[in-house]
Structures are given as C-alpha cells and as structure tokens.
Image: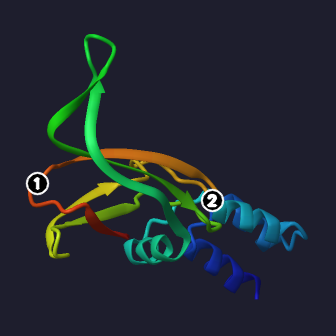
Amino acid sequence: MKRAAVQLALALGISAAACRGAESGAKDAAPAADAAAADAVIEDEEARAKYVEEHLEVTGLDIAPDTKPGDDGGVLRVGGLLRVTGLVTNKGDRAVKNARIGVHVMDASGNVIGSYFHDVAGNKRLAPKEARPFKFQIPEKKEYGGKFTFSLR
C-alpha cells in the first residue's frame, strides 16, 4: 500500500522528500504530501490544461483603448492598440505556470474578427488561491464592435 501511495505522489509531481514520509509510515505524510502537491507546478500539458479550465477564474476582463501619460500630465490615446486588463485567480489547490487566455474580438454583428492569446500567469508560478492582475495589448481593428469572448487554457 505504501508503495502505491509513493508512486501516486510521484505521478502528481510530489518531491522525493515528501515521499520519504510515506515510505517510513510517518503519521504526517499526508499533510506533507498535500503541501508538496500545492508547491509543485503541474508539468504535464494535458493535466495543466484541464486544471486551468477547472480551477482558474478570470474576473474584471476589459478591453479599452490603450493610453499613455502625455507630456502635459494628461492622458493620450495610443493609436492602433487596445489594452486588455483583468485578474486571474487560481481557485484550486495546485500551482500552475502557464495560463493562456484567448480573447476573441467581434464586429457589431457578433462575427469573430480576431483572436489573440496571452499567458495571464506571466510565465511565473501561480500558487493556489493566488490572484494576479494582467494587462496586454492587442491591435485595434476598425471593425471592432465592442463585443468579445474569451477562453482560458
């Protein structure tokens, strides 16, 4: 039974140090395994993609004209660019490193006129229960009708 637990722990990406507790029959092996699972970043692409879809949440997603500070202290619009902003939250119990959002902009009729992808985790570890703001730019299209959808993978 202990061997099966160690093999499962290793398959989940739990460190060998955490597995030693399970091998020795230590009573605190389960908490150590849980902590190691939370610290380990999901490496397998299929498992990562499934986890992201089930446990990551994007809130406050907005697409607006991009701006920059003007020389006079005002705000200037950056022509040709839209700024995408939001907050990604890891609601699960595992860490992930890549979380790609696909933003699909539409014309006034609801037809997708462009799809843009960005790693909202910033290629950094997103710990369990952690929330991280993101922003990136996409090209502005004159056909953009103010509608968009998104997907997270």
Tally of numbered tags: 2
Question: Between residues 51 and 28, which one lies in front from this camera angle?
Answer: 51
Relative to 50, is 129 above or below? Answer: above
Quadrant location of the N terminus in the rendered image: bottom right
The Cα–Cα distance between marks 2 and 1, rounded to whole angstroms, is: 37 Å
- Residue positioned 63% across, 56% down in the render: 39
Amino acid type indicated by mark 2: Pro
Question: Between residues 14 and 35, which one lies in front from this camera angle?
Answer: 35
Horizontally, residue 26 falls left or right of residue 3, namely right
Q: Quadrant of residue 22?
A: bottom right
**Residue 45, x across and y down, in percent:** 38, 72
The reply to whether residue 16 is visible in this rendering is: no
Secondary structure under the numbered disc 1 in the rendered image: loop
Give the mark nearest the N terminus, 2 or 1: 2
Question: Between residues 87 and 60, which one lies in front from this camera angle?
Answer: 60
Toward the left, the furthest residue is 142
Label of residue 141 in the image: 1
Horizontally, residue 129 falls left or right of residue 108, namely right
- Residue positioned 70% across, 81% down in the render: 5
**Residue 10, x across and y down, in percent:** 59, 72
- Residue positioned 63% across, 59% down in the render: 128
**Residue 69, x across and y down, in percent:** 30, 21
Q: Quadrant of residue 94?
A: bottom right
Horizontally, residue 100 falls left or right of residue 92, namely left
| Residue on which disc 2 sits | 128
